[in-house]
Image (tube, rainbow, N blue to C red):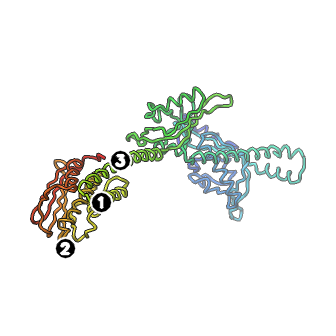
Amino acid sequence: MKELAISGDLAVDLATAFDASPNPYMLLTPELHFAGMNAAYLDVVGSTRADLIGRNLFEVFDGGATDEGRENSRQLRASFERVLETGEPDHLAVIRYAIPRTLPSGETVLEERYWSATHTPIRDSDGRTAYILQHTNDITELEILRRQAAGRQTETALTNMVSGDILTRAEHVQEDNRRLQTERNRLFDIFMQAPGFITVLSGPNHVFQMHNAAYARLVGRDDLVGKSVVEALPEVREQGFINLLDQVWITGEAIEGRGSPLQIRRHNGGPLETVYVDFVYQPIRDAAGRIVGIFVQGHEVTDIVLAVERQRLMIDELNHRVKNTLATVQSIAMQTARTHIDPASFAETFQARLMALSHTHDLLTRSHWEGAELGAILEHETEAHGPQRVLLNGPPLALTPATALSLGMIFHELATNAAKFGALSSVDGRVLVDWTIIDRPVRRLNLTWREVDGPPVEAPSRRGFGSRLIERSVRHDLAGSIDLRYSIGGFEATISIPLDRGDPT
């Protein structure tokens, strides 16, 4: 037991008085273990100090195995928990509780007894509850007399004197208190488990009185009660929320916010994180109508706000890309028309080029326009010629949408030319595509398109649209360089483009 800050002689006198008191007393630790008791208590329960000290109360007195016994144990435990939770005394007017008795034969039985008890917190120097002092009165005889009198339905003076009315009223009051406590616990559970965040602030400085689990998750801490908002959450001081709380306190009118950004430090010493909240600040008034606090409730809507923002950006991106695509289609149509006078030839070439554009669009759509993989683009544009005839060799490389679209058109033109005039126009011809990634001095893609085992080739007498499209795409759209070589062994194109330019589309 902790030592009290009193003189030795006085401590001895107090201990002697405690043990000599005719009223039963016992002392429990916060874990409900016996820490001490007086002789009157030992007489009432028929036990010894050696049997009780250090043991749990409910291990010694379990109340019995019946439903009523378990309910009585629950009431007693709930009284202790209220003392530990509130730091205030708690009273049980009447409780039926069985205690073990040893018969002369040596057999131990449970004897039903009725008690009236007061539980008082004993605080240490820090103000914490160090012990619970129980003052118990055995009122079994009174209760038996009351029940006998009530059973005979007499109106004798004994019934009135021996608690017929008094104990009945006490039981009613206790039952009402029990119902109120149950309702309070139920409302508190609802408060704590509410999906939205809730907190109650008091006074002009907005001091936390209580908050639920959702609020603790929102701000990333649980040590709020007793602190003002500025003390507990200093990072919100300059974000306007304190001014809004002050306004509610002064005017008494509620304030509502929708999708409001809140910067909060959810981890001690961590960075500020931005979340978005819907909230309502509602004034709390006392019986006289004075404002005594503010009720805060709301929901975190970060996911919703970010989803709306992503949707807006996607719509803007879509509009931009549609315009770019239409401009590309217009350019393809005009250039194809210049080099194909025959309508049938124009339609065939134009459709093939549109399909190449469509293939790359399909790849980008699958990745939500975040990019496409170089090898996948090459496979799409050359798959019609068979995987054995177009051999791809290079590391995985994710491309931005703009780079993917440009390279898709380039590969289509190279494959078309190879099928018409180059290696893919003969049975044995093949195309070898090799690429590497160079990191210094800047990150670049170096790619070689080499045709082998095809017919002899020679440089064209004039540059067609395909060649101009390839050169324009590499040099202007991709800011790279290209070298086209027409040798007897076969056509070869070497392309080099930077990879860290972003997405200009």
Residue 408 falls in image quadrant: bottom left
Find residue 481 and name its label: none
Residue beneath label 3, please?
323
Please tell me which residue lies in front, 387 or 47.
387
Find residue 427 and name its label: 2
Labels 2 and 3 touching (C-beta < 8 A): no
83 versus 204 height, above or below: below
First-in-chain label (1 vs 2)? 1
In this view, the residue farthest toward the left is: 488
> Tag 2: residue type?
Val
- The N terminus is located in which quarter? top right
Residue beneath label 1, please?
343
Q: Disc 1 versus disc 3: distance between alpha carbons?
A: 26 Å
Q: Position of residue 390 (x, y in %)?
A: 22, 67
Please tell me whether mark 1 sits on a helix, a strand or a loop: helix
Q: Label 3 neighbourhood size at 10 Å, few (<14), some (14-19), many (20+)?
A: few
On screen, residue 319 versus residue 195, left or right, reads: left
